[in-house]
Amino acid sequence: MVVAALAGALLSAPSGAGAQSSLGEGRRQATRAELEQAAKATEQAAVVAPDQKTREKLLSDAVAIRQRLRNGDFLPGDRIYIVVLGDSALTDTFTVRGDRRLQLPNIPDITLAGVLDSELGGFLTTELSRYLKNPVVSATGMVRLTLTGGVARNGFLTFPVDQAITDVLMTAGGIGPGARLDQAEVKRSGKVLIGKKQFQEAIRLARTVGDLSLRDGDEIYVPPATATSGVQTWVKVLGVVTPLIFLVRVLSNSNRGRIF
């Protein structure tokens, strides 16, 4: 239906069949207006849903969006990189406390309850303007991801939400020889969140960490090279190189009228 399609188009991030993301977990940089529109569209779609199962799913999605609008995007333990032009003390990475407050040097605690990721920079500018004169502020949420398999550097790395997935892979040292980037996927709690085709699409469209709605602990897995893939690679190489070697020998010995 049109209203359901609208809600999905506003917020959808690629996801694997095994673990579909709900609309309430959609694109990290979605604006408040987009979320409001998506919630309304989803609620309208639930009214005309063809069956009970679909209706319950749409209502659950709408509730998740409304909850996101109330609570905001920042959870305890989230990290935020803040830059305040000309103020080195306030330019750093800060962690959201258990009460969803941000503790900054020489500034009263700032609550992030109800603040969306898309509102963060403007919100902090307004808050800091109470204590600083015309502050120039930028702020970016950070996500800690696990990279495993055929990347050069396996382990935990932290990235800003606006960093492209291609840059994430490069930061991990790039893809190793024979690694299957075409089979890469994203997992959450051991289950596939973003499947192979969706991950390839994300790379092609230069999607960011935030576009995919990745969270702390999500794993990007690139299957490493295997013995079988190595043999296949060498077979392909030999299939090309062997005729070339033979041709070179033919040409180099043609004057002597013999081939070895």
Image (cartoon, rainbow, N blue to C red):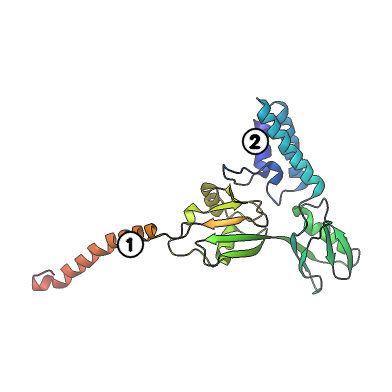
Q: Secondary structure at mark 1?
A: helix
* Residue displayed at 37% across by 57% down: 228
Q: Which label number is shown at residue 5?
A: 2
Q: Is residue 7 above or below residue 168?
A: above
Task: Identify the residue position indicated by label 1 in the image.
Answer: 234
* Residue displayed at 86% across by 66% down: 134
Amino acid beneath label 1: Trp
Front disc: 1 or 2:
1
Residue 225 rendering spot, x and y as whole percentages: 43, 60
Amino acid beneath label 2: Ala
Q: Is residue 220 above or below residue 69?
A: below
Contact between labelled residues 2 and 1, with CB atoms less than 8 Å apart: no
State the residue in front, 18 or 237: 18
Mark pair 1, 2: CA separation: 47 Å
Residue 118 rendering spot, x and y as whole percentages: 75, 53
Q: Quadrant of residue 255?
A: bottom left
* Residue displayed at 69% across by 29% down: 55
Residue 4 rendering spot, x and y as whole percentages: 67, 34
* Residue displayed at 57% across by 51% down: 202
Left or right: 130 with respect to 205?
right
